[in-house]
Structure formats: structure tokens, C-alpha cells
Image: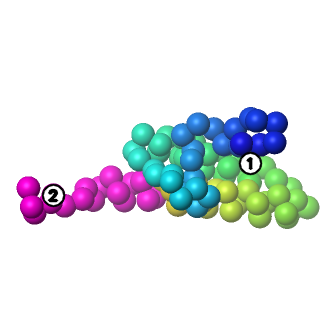
Amino acid sequence: MTRDGTPSRPIGMCDSARCPQATHHPCHRPVWAEAADNGKVFVAGLSRGQKTERSRLEAEVARAQQVVTEIDAANTNPPAPDEGD
């Protein structure tokens, strides 16, 4: 939350890099994928003189893409069933 009480990220974007209780599931993928795609568009539209903003956005895009990749990896490799069952 920001100081004025508004969410700092859209609902569905809890980030495990910032919150140890956050988890990412397939239902969160569309929000993170959209954040990565939108970030790429913004980075492409920046002028050369906006180095600080470019660096900040590139880091956000990389983080969003990392979350998407982790969600995809977890979704394609389901956990093994418990042997004790």
C-alpha cells in the first residue's frame, strides 16, 4: 500500500521478492504477463535521455518475466505424489 492507502500493485500481483507470504499460481499468470508486455512497450517508447527510467522499467519487466517463467515451470512440472498415500 502507498501512504494514501491505494494498492501499490494491482490485485493478483503479490510479489514473492517483496513479501515472503506471496505465492504465484497459474491464475496469476495473466496479470504478470500483461505487466511484462506493457513494460516492454513503455521501455521501447523511452528516449535515450531517460536512462534512469529505462533502467527502472527494465528491472520491472525482468521481474515480471521471471515470475511468468516460474509459473510456467511450476505448471509444467507438477509435484510428485506422496509415497505415503
Label 2 close to label 1 by CB (< 8 Å) = no
Residue 44 coordinates in the image, percent (x, y): 74, 53
Whether 71 is among the magenta residues is yes
Q: CA distance from mark 2 to mark 1?
A: 43 Å
Residue at 42% x, 54% y: name it: 71
Residue 11 coordinates in the image, percent (x, y): 58, 36
Tell me which segment is drawn in magenta. Answer: 69-85
User: Given the image, on which type of amino acid does mark 2 rest?
Assistant: Pro
Residue 65 in sight from this viewpoint: no
In this rendering, position of residue 54 left or right of residue 16: right
Whether 59 is among the magenta residues is no
Residue 6: quadrant of the picture: top right
User: Given the image, on which type of amino acid does mark 1 rest?
Assistant: Phe
Label 1 Cα crowd, 10 Å radius (few <14 / some 14-19 / many 20+): some
Residue at 42% x, 40% y: name it: 27
Residue 31: quadrant of the picture: top right
Residue 22 in sight from this viewpoint: yes
Residue 56, relative to residue 34: is it above or below? Answer: below
Q: Secondary structure at mark 1?
A: helix
Q: Which residue in the structure is indicated by mark 1?
A: 42
Asked which colour scheme the image uses, the reply is rainbow
Q: Which residue in the structure is indicated by mark 2?
A: 81
Residue 25 coordinates in the image, percent (x, y): 41, 47
Residue 51 coordinates in the image, percent (x, y): 85, 64
Tag shown at residue 6? none
| Residue sitting nearer the eye, 56 or 47 | 56
In this rendering, position of residue 57 left or right of residue 80: right
